[in-house]
Amino acid sequence: MCGIFGFVGRIKPETAKACTDSLAHRGPDGGGLLHRPDVTLGHRRLAILDLSDAGRQPMTSPDGRYTIVYNGEIYNFLELRARLTALGRSFKSESDTEVLLAAYAQWGPECLPRCNGMWAMAVWDDAEKTLFLARDRFGKKPLFHARTQSGFAFASEMKALFPLLPQIRPNEELVRDSSRIMYYEATPECLVRGVTRFPAGHWGVWRKGELDLRRWWHTLDHLPESPKSFNGQAKRFRELFLDACSLRLRSDVPVGCALSGGLDSSSTLAGVARAARTKDNARGSENWQHAFCASFKGTPLEERPFAERMAAHVGVPLTSLEIDPAANLGNLYRHLRLFEEMHLTMPLPFILTYGAIREQNIRVSIDGHGADECFAGYMRHVREALACAGKNPSAISSIIKAWFRGFPRSPQFPLPRPRRFLMDYRREHRRSPEVRSKDADHPAWRGLDHLGKALYVAVHESILPTLLRNYDRFSMANGVEIRMPFMDHRLVILSFSLPWRSKVRGGFSKAVVRRGMSGMLPREIAYRPTKIGFNAPIVDWMRGPFREFFLDTLASPDFRQCSLVDADRASRRVAAVLDNPLATYAEGERAWTSVVPYFWEQALIKGKDTP
């Protein structure tokens, strides 16, 4: 896991070094720079596998033809290495980087489907004078690029490209449009003009001034035949999930888990514990007994009691991280600069959580992200199952029960009555009965039920791309790598081969996950219906420790003159939270998104360190 930079063309060595070193937070364990007249490749290293100098990048193949810089992990590198050795390849290191380089030299772009992992990679072909770029199936690792007057540049983060841009300007139309805040990550468009996002599941070749892009992964091309029975499906899920945990335990440094006490993170901790105790856990970290929980005392988002129950069940100590927002207000701009993007809530608790994990000498966190999007964990998707239930009273009752029980019992999350909920949904569904997707012309799309289509959009076009981006920034801001067993591509394609009844069943969301993990979790966690999620308690913080800060911001001349915000609307939305003791979480998100473009501009575009 690292930060990468590259430039095809002529660039001053000191400029290339500055671009690369702007990613030092992603790779605090050292850096490397290959500078040639026609290409420059830079790397910042977070050492996870083979901590010796043999694992350093840029790395060049034995024949001198190919040089790679890459950010990510290839979890099945041991199996790939064995296959390549049988084909006559030899290795000098114990790193996955050398395996990936050899795989590319052996198979070219066809090496990508053989890899189980996450990556953004660049390979320079010195014979052909071409640059190969590729990104993993779902975009877990970021990659940006830009064309300049003197060449072509790429990097893990936008800020590494800033020294090469003629000027750093916000993409005002996108920055101002809060309705797109959960949707732009799956597009080439970026918040900064002149920077383009490389698409997930694609590879490309830069040759003679042009980037030729090819899509190498399409989820709908790979849907398997799933077992017919629900128990068979749950068994298949469990087998794949435990193998995914085992692969992600491979590490030469200590490993931990971010634990909320919910189903997803608890399943991940249980899976890691099971994998660590098996004899066939090749190259698995022996130092894995670490669990971390962010605590938000006195707010609806407090989950520490559940995390304590799960940690005790597995037999690992739990470190509770007390998040003090007031003590970290001065870091808001620095955190926003590290984050680079805009989201529905502030990044403080997330960045602080992974910072605390790093302070405990943990470089790898195995987390439960991705389950909600694939297996219908969000209440908005549970609701979509109604379109599949038709007029079946039993099915409708089960869906409403799952939806009703999933909401936190707090005034911040108001719950309409079930009858009104059903009437509202049917009216909305009549207006817009079809789920729209950029992949809707694929033959397999027609085979998905309504819920499957809604989840497909969430996984590929909206929620999940945004979540993957966010957690990459939150963790890498602190030099911590996140691994996600639920995002193993074998589990993703399994999820889309399952009917809606395997996801919303018996009054529960994520039913196949609950059944698959039963016996490995305490029942009160495996069948805990409430969905809270790891979020910032924005309402409590705005009304409490951040109150004066927001009032001062709204009153400042700089804010009133900022072209990226509607100052009057922002004032109304913030007042709706500060002056209303019954303000909802959704109102808190609206208040934050109305103000954050100003904070973002101050931090990233103008480079201010403190509010």
Image: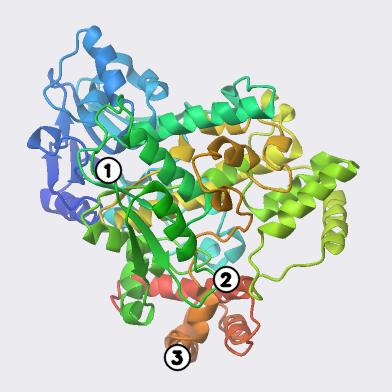
Read off the residue under disc 1: 1
Read off the residue under disc 2: 589
Disc 1 is placed on an element classified as: loop
Residue occupying the point 24% across, 8% down: 86
User: How far is disc 3 from disc 2 in space, using C-alphas?
Assistant: 18 Å
Q: Earlier in the sequence, mark 3 or mark 2?
A: 3
Q: Earlier in the sequence, mark 3 or mark 1?
A: 1
**Does residue 497 show up?**
no
Read off the residue under disc 3: 548
Q: Nearer the viewer, residue 395 or 76?
A: 395
Question: Looking at numbered disc 3 in the image, what kind of residue is underneath it?
Answer: Glu
Residue occupying the point 52% across, 54% down: 262
Disc 2 is placed on an element classified as: helix
Q: Residues within 10 Å of mark 1 (few under 14, many from 20)?
A: many
User: How far is disc 3 from disc 1 in space, using C-alphas?
Assistant: 39 Å
Answer with left or right where residue 136 lies relative to residue 68: right
**Contact? badges 3 and 1 (CB < 8 Å):** no
Give the numbered dot on residue 597: none
Q: Nearer the viewer, residue 234 or 2?
A: 234
**Residue 473 image point, x, y percent:** 36, 55
Question: Looking at numbered disc 2 in the image, what kind of residue is underneath it?
Answer: Glu
Disc 3 is placed on an element classified as: helix
Q: Nearer the viewer, residue 464 or 213?
A: 464
User: How far is disc 1 from disc 2 in space, using C-alphas?
Assistant: 31 Å
Q: Quadrant of residue 417?
A: bottom right
Q: Earlier in the sequence, mark 1 or mark 2?
A: 1
Q: In what quadrant of the picture does the C terminus appear?
A: bottom left
